[in-house]
Amino acid sequence: MTARLIDGAALAVQIKQQVAHDAAALTARGVQPGLAVILVGDSQASAVYVRNKVKACEQAGIHSVFDHLPGDTSQATLLARIAELNADPSVHGILVQLPLPAQIDPQSVIAAIDPAKDVDGFHVRNAGALMTGAPLFKPCTPYGVMKMLEQLGTPLRGAEAVVVGASNIVGKPMALLLLQAGATVTICNSKTRDLPAHTRRADVLVVAVGRERMITGDMVKPGAIVIDVGMNRYSSGPKAGKLCGDVDFDSAVNVAGAITPVPGGVGPMTIAMLMVNTIESARRDPRLKEAA
């Protein structure tokens, strides 16, 4: 059996087309959606992510503000810039690219963003509201995974879902969204005993740990849906330096029922859902009510 490939890139294109339509409609009513992205330092990987986000916004008709600050920027300077963007009515979403230089505390930065503009869904008010099922914004990567499962027609109610990785950015919110969809959810982490015993019973397996090919085909339940959130590079062999995920695709593809590739799986969906969240924020712009 060869698994069905879950084409996140193709689904992201469809979502971006709807975003462009929504952005045009809002702009026609006098409110152009706006997203501000801040990059601190010169990380090449972060620069690529930011460039892709800014480009996607421009293509969809979303006004983009891009601040590239030097690596020695102080925390006070960054917080002051965030305060300016919080007060700017043309900006509906604020994203500070992580990771940040050592002199800046990421939690302080996230806390400084207006929760109503926290399109990443990382602010403690949005994270806490996710627990009750009513966040202003769902975190982009888990939100994208749920959209992929929805398109696949995956019946989540009653399904066994296993999330490997317990980060605040992916693992924890992913588990909450799956739980809200009716799945029975297990969260695994680096301390989990006998990890294969958990992964082998998963109808839906989501892996987000940042470790190259740690989930192999013999750890996957036959016919399972495998979502690989990881983005790593082969450390050795003929593919050394090329992108790979947290799942050993070559072995898992012969066991799973459906699987996301890396690249071309979850990554494009993260950017697409960032844009969806920005549109949602723009819809709450008080100027729309005034014009109605």
Image: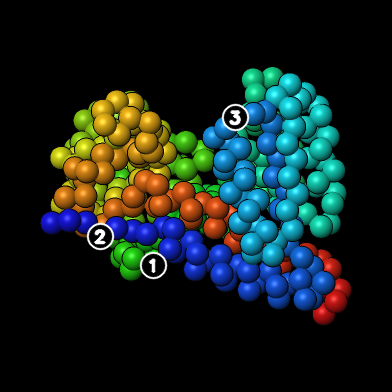
Q: Quadrant of residue 9?
A: bottom left
Q: Earlier in the sequence, mark 2 or mark 1?
A: 2
For label 1, count other residues whose C-alpha is less than 10 Å away and answer few (under 14), some (14-19) or many (20+): few
Q: Nearer the viewer, residue 45 or 227?
A: 45
Q: Residue at x 62, y 43 (%)?
A: 50
What amino acid does circle 3 point to?
Ser
Position above or below: 214 against 289:
above
Q: Secondary structure at mark 1?
A: helix
- The tag earlier along the polypeptide, 3 or 1, is 3
Say above or below: 47 vs 255.
above
**Residue type marked 1:** Gln
User: Can residue 184 be spotted in the picture?
Assistant: no
Residue 222 relative to residue 283: left or right = left
In the rendered image, residue 172, in percent from the top left (x then y), is placed at 46, 42
> Would you name the residue on which mark 1 appears?
151
Question: Marks 2 and 3, how far apart in space?
Answer: 35 Å
Q: Nearer the viewer, residue 52 or 36?
A: 52
- Disc 2 versus disc 3: nearer the observer: 3
Give the class, few, some or many, for how many residues have Cα within 10 Å of label 2's Cα (few <14, many ≥20).
Answer: some
Give coordinates of residue 196: x percent, y percent: 20, 36
Cα–Cα gap, marks 2 and 1: 13 Å
Element type at mark 3: loop
Q: Quadrant of the C terminus?
A: bottom right
Q: Which residue is mark 2?
A: 4
The reply to whether discs 3 and 1 touch (Cβ–Cβ < 8 Å) is no
Q: Which residue is mark 3?
A: 43
Select label 2 or label 1 by which is in front.
2
Which quadrant would the N terminus be assigned to in this image? bottom left
